[in-house]
Image: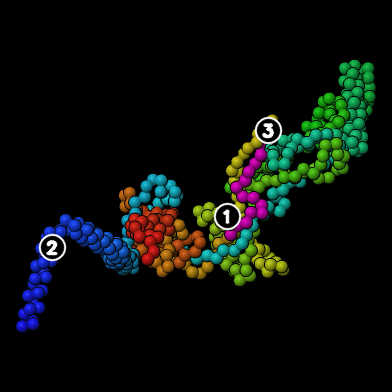
Amino acid sequence: MKKKIATTASIVVLIGASVAAALTYNHWLPPVREYFVSLQTGADKNEADDHASDDPHDHASDDAHDHASDDAHDHATDDAHDHATDDAHDHAADEAPDEEGSLHLSPEARQNIGLTTGVVSKSGFTRTVSVPAVVVERPGHSQIEITAPMTGVINSISIQEGLSKQPGAELFKLRLTHEDVVSSQRDYLKFLQERDVIQREIDRLKKIGNDIIPERRVIEQQYLHDKAEASIKALQQSLILHGLTPEQVDTIAKTRDVLKEISILAPEFETGQAENGASSAYHVQEISVNRGQSVVAGQKLGVLADHSLLFVEGQAFEEDAKRLINAINSGQSLKVIPVSGKPGQASDLKLLFVADHVDQQSRALNFYLLLPNKRVDQFGNVSDGSTFLSWKFRPGQRMEVQLPTDQSWQEQVVLPPEAVAIEGPNAFVFEQHGDHFDRVEVHVLYRDKNAVVVEDRGDLVGSTLAMSGAYEMHLALKNQAGGGVDPHAGHSH
């Protein structure tokens, strides 16, 4: 009963409250509405703040994760691609065989390497050993010493060192002061005058006739004439012995004047030079006096040199003596190469003789070869038409002489060193076919700095090979086979 009354009371209260609220809503509804609006605004603001604080972290993490995943994938892909490409490239380079290739050279490239070609033929080759040598003058023949024929004073010097001179050309002028020469000239003029007087007397007596003048008078004058003539001839020979030429003596007789100065002339060339392929030519090697200097008979005035024919002095070992003597007896020539020259500049020279003793200091056995020289230049013309000389070979120039050994090859291919490219155990030559060259591998039997002996397999004889620049062509062919520039060059992982 009590419970029912309580329920009814509650209902009555609620109804009363509802009626009161309805009657008074104008007073309480606006504040309540503002309250709920403020609550909603605060909730929205809190939600925005929460989203702002949480979202950068989530997005940054998500973006970083996605970007890292993508980068890792791309980098792994690139690395895999690069390593695969490099490995494939290296593997292909390692496995690619070094086969014969073809090379095309432009005209400029041929000039750059100095390319020359030649047709291959069979020949023999004898191994040689090189021994040192030097160019020397021929003692007693290459130098001509000019001396004063008599005492005098040097009036003028007509030469310069290095200047060429022909036989008969004036070298010096010497003013005569030699007492014997002066007195001989005086006596010579005196007897010339006496002979003339006697001759006139003989002519006068003969003109008068024997009827008036006894014949004995004519005979006496003829005797005096012959005596004067004998003295004149003796004085002529004396003057010539003192250094005057017959022409100068005749000049004294014609002018009836004392010769005050004489010209010292270049002598004639030595005979037999042309037989050895030499063309003689003097050049002034030394001038030993000055103008105004007083000199005595026999004093050296200067030196003329004729280097048209020289010696090559080689130094061999004692055990080479027999080989050298055999070369002399057989008339065999030896190859001589300048130290600074090339094999193509070798000269085949005749071996003259081997020294009769071994040098005590060097323990070398000297031998000598005849070297015909050649004038290669004339320059510096002077007023009298003379020139300065330049020779192909000069004394003191170092050479190498190739002495043959017992080792030889017959019917093989002999090439210059520049025609064969050698790399490790492989050797190549380049055969020309039109405008390109094919690399051909060959077997080298022997090589030195002067020649390479290649085995004749029958495929090279008659073909045209590059006789120079083979190694440069080999490098160009390797670069050509290697392709263009590696796109990954310089890229490090």
In-image side of 406 versus 58 (left or right): right
In-image side of 93 versus 193 (left or right): left
> Where does residue 262 sit, x and y in percent of width and height?
81, 34
Whole-angstrom CA distance, mark 1 to mark 2, is 135 Å
Please say whether residue 155 is one of the residues in the magenta stretch. no
Q: Nearer the viewer, mark 3 or mark 2?
A: 2
Going 72% across and 52% down the picture, which residue do you hit? 140
**Residue for badge 3:** 382
How is the rendered protein coloured? Answer: rainbow
Going 87% across and 39% down the picture, which residue do you hit? 294
> Where does residue 126 sit, x and y in percent of width and height?
48, 64
* Residue located farthest toward the bottom when viewing the structure as drawn: 1
The amino acid type found where label 1 is placed reads: Ser
Q: Which residues are magenta?
A: 386-400
Instruction: Specify the label residue 20 is tagged with.
Output: 2
Q: Give the position of the C terminus as an image quadrant.
A: bottom left
- Compared to residue 10, the image places residue 229 above or below, namely above
**Residue for badge 1:** 340
Q: Pointer 3: residues within 10 angstroms few (<14), some, or many (20+)?
A: few
Going 61% across and 71% down the picture, which residue do you hit? 319
Q: Nearer the viewer, mark 1 or mark 3?
A: 1
- Of mark 1 and mark 2, the one earlier in the sequence is 2
Disc 2 secondary structure class? helix
In-image side of 90 versus 32 (left or right): right
Going 9% across and 67% down the picture, which residue do you hit? 15
Q: Nearer the viewer, mark 1 or mark 2?
A: 2
In the picture, residue 44 is in which quadrant? bottom left
- Compared to residue 463, the image places residue 76 above or below, namely below
